Image: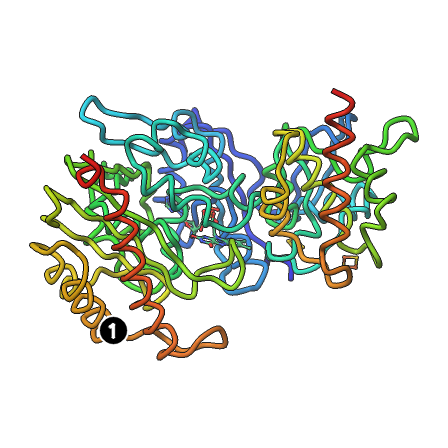
Amino acid sequence: MSDSTTHVAIGGDITIGCTVNGEAVAVQVPVRTSLSDMLRAALGLTGTHLGCEHGVCGACTIIVDGAAVRSCLMLAAQAEGSDIRTIEGLAVDGRWHPVQTAMHDHHGFQCAFCAPGFMMTAVAMLEDDPNRSEQEIREELGGNLCRCTGYESIVDGVLAAVATLRGAS
Amino acid sequence: MKAPPFAYARPTTLDGALELLSTHADSKVLAGGQSLLPVMNLRLGAPSLLVDISRIPMLDRIVVDDDGAVTIGALVTHTAVEGSADIARHAPLVAEAAPYIGHRAIRNRGTCVGSIAHADPAAEMPAVCLATDAIMISTSTHGDRVIPASAFFTGFLDTALRDDELLAAVRFPASPPGATGSVVEVSRRHGDYALAGLVCRLVVERGTITDAALAYFGVGPTAERVPEAEALLVGSDGRGPALDRAVEAVEATLDPPSDVHGTTAYRRHLAGVLCRRGVADAIARSTEEVA
Ligand SMILES: Cc1cc2nc3c(=O)[nH]c(=O)nc-3n(C[C@H](O)[C@H](O)[C@H](O)COP(=O)(O)OP(=O)(O)OC[C@H]3O[C@@H](n4cnc5c(N)ncnc54)[C@H](O)[C@@H]3O)c2cc1C
Ligand code: FES
Ligand code: FES
């Protein structure tokens, strides 16, 4: 094999260095570990939920290097060097993120299994562009499934967050 | 729902990746992982080595030639395609197809080239390639190959790529004057794989169609063109009886599969409806007409 190639683990375990919610971490996991399992099992961050584990439900959505991703469709190994944000990192010093507050105020969720995925999707969307129309919000949230609410309360919550963020800026 | 064990390598040079692919039987390229990881999680596939190409430089580029041809590298994501002014201008059908693919979080990691290499029968990009006569640029330790789209999609999830080859880029040739087109599809929910879809590309000169491509997806084992219907459109204005005949030819030629989402008859009907809609949209957009 050529010298110019950096190989990471062939089989066995792999050590991942990355930032999770602002903190540098180094974790050793089996090579086949998904990023979602690394967060949940190795780091104890069980706020990231797993529904389908094949990209369809959106419950596992987190933010990696500023973009919403399915943590079930990313290997922990692929996250080497990246900046990861999960639902646990949304509140700052015990103060909720405007999206969390808006969801609470509008009774956005019922069982809330889907909540972390929806909120991380919403946060990434509003950080990318806070001036979102209802149509755009519905489209961007279209990749997340909720089995309880019928979605209206979730859309209301995100619309309220848009209004808060607009007022704040 | 967890992937079976595998080995993982993350080469930082293209040569390093090609060497791994050539020396390890049953290795697979890992690009965005948005098709490969579901396949592995569902245990529908179990490659022994994943070659993660994400850290190889230069593969994330979008290059426009002087003549307007657009080359999209292996690491360009669907989201990057959507955000590219160059692609919107020079390869408008690629830009139009991208937002149909999955959802934002999928598009943030999934790659345009990966979608072509994966060759899902219901995926948009293979049909865009067929409609626009795109060219695949593959590379291996044995050198580069260029493969026209017409020879690339060989069957269900199957392409002309060899196991040791990496698809480095896809090139979309410059559009001729008078080119117009449209992407239309029917899916159960925006972002879901299409029940049936069409990439329509026409060249219209003074109100007459001089060239036509109808590339369907979701209606067979692979994306496919319908030359019988295309021939009926050429020389016509794409309306009235000419369009009726093209729709009939589409319905007579395609033999879509039945599954839980739709029967053969329903998908065939959709294909006809999409022909009507796609050709009308393309003609409505034709700059020739406006002039
Ligand atoms: C919920 C969901 C919905 C989706 N909906 C759609 C949809 O509506 N339309 C659609 O088109 N797609 C859809 N997709 C799939 C998505 O488009 C993927 O991004 C794409 O199919 C594969 O790109 P990737 O970079 O993720 O490839 P990977 O998953 O990394 O690879 C896929 C396959 O291609 C091979 N491969 C990838 N890149 C290369 C290369 N450069 N050279 C050689 N081989 C390569 C891999 O070895 C693997 O076999 C969906 C996916 C999910 C999870
Ligand atoms: S658990 Fe990841 S999308 Fe469903
Ligand atoms: S609130 Fe129960 S799944 Fe969404």
Q: Quadrant of the N terminus of chain A?
A: top left
* Residue occupied by mark 1: B251
* Amino acid type indicated by mark 1: Glu
- B120 sits to left or right of A136: left
Quadrant in which residue B257 is drawn: bottom left
**Relative to B273, does residue B118 appear above or below in the rendering?**
above
Quadrant in which residue B66 is drawn: top left
Residue sitting at 39 percent across and 76 percent down? Answer: B266
**Relative to A116, does residue B154 appear above or below in the rendering?**
below
- A119 sits to left or right of B261: right
Helix, strand or loop at label 1? It is: helix
Residue B133 image point, x, y percent: 20, 46
- B32 sits to left or right of B284: right
Scheme of colours in the image = rainbow
Most foreground residue, A11 or B150: B150
Most foreground residue, A23 or A66: A66
Residue A99 image point, x, y percent: 78, 37
